[in-house]
Amino acid sequence: MTPSDGVQALTLDVHLGPQDLAAALRADVLTGLTSRPKQLQPRWFYDETGCSLFDQITSLDEYYLTRREREILLNHADDIAVATGADTLVELGSGTSEKTRILLDAFAEAGTLERFVPFDIAEATLRSAAAAVATAPSCCRRSPGISTTESRCCSAVTSSRTPPGSRLPTTTCSA
C-alpha cells in the first residue's frame, strides 16, 4: 500500500513478450493447420476484443455457467476458505477475476490470505483485473499477477516469489 492513497500496488510479471507471442502463434497455427481435423487453440481469441466479447457472452441468459459458479461461490466460499486454510490463491485463466473476488473476501475474512496469483494470457485484461482487485478491501499483501501461456504456467507459479513455508495454494479455474 502506498501511504497516500491506501491502495495496494500489485505486481504484474509478464512472461510473454511480443516475440514470444508471435512464435507461439506461429507454432500453434502450424500444428493446427497440419493436424486432422484442423484446429486453432482458443487462447488466440482472447485479445482485448475477445475478452470483451466473452464477458458479454457470459452475461447472456443462455450462458448459465457463470451465474451458477457465482451462486456456488456465494454459498460456499467461507467453507472453502476455512477448510483449506490456504494463504495463497492461484487462479488459472483469471480474466476479470470477478467471481474470484468472492473467494478473496472469504479468505480475507478467515484471516489466512497473503497472496493472490492470477494467471492469464490476456495482459490488458489481467492489468485491469489486478487494478480492480488492488482497490478491494480484501486485497492481500503480496499479489503478483502473471501473464503467460498454459505451458509456462507451472514454472511461473514455482518461480513467482513463493515465500518459504507457504501452504499449498488453492486453485480455481474460471471460464
Image (cartoon, rainbow, N blue to C red):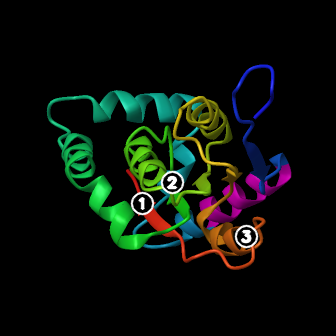
Task: Find out whether residue 163 is within the magenta segment.
Answer: no
Q: Residue at x 64, y 60 (%)?
A: 149
Range of magenta residues: 19-30
Is residue 123 or residue 102 the one in the foreground?
102
Q: Which residue is mark 3?
A: 162
Task: Find out whether residue 28 is within the magenta segment.
Answer: yes
Q: Which residue is mark 1?
A: 173
Residue 130, quarter of picture: top right
Indicate left or right for 73 with 87 as reference. Answer: left
Judge the density around disc 2: few (<14), some (14-19), many (≥20) Cα neighbours within 10 Å: many
Compare marks 3 and 1 and give the one earlier in the sequence: 3
Say what amino acid the circle numbered 2 marks.
Answer: Gly
Q: Residue at x 61, y 47 (%)?
A: 140
Indicate left or right for 65 with 170 as reference. Answer: left
Rounded to the nearest angstrom, the CA distance separating label 3 from label 1 is 20 Å
Query: Residue 93, labelled with which disc?
Result: 2
Compare marks 1 and 2 and give the one earlier in the sequence: 2
Above or below residue 82? Residue 102 is above
Rounded to the nearest angstrom, the CA distance separating label 1 from label 2 is 6 Å
Indicate left or right for 8 with 112 as reference. Answer: right
Which of label 3 and label 2 is nearer to you? 3
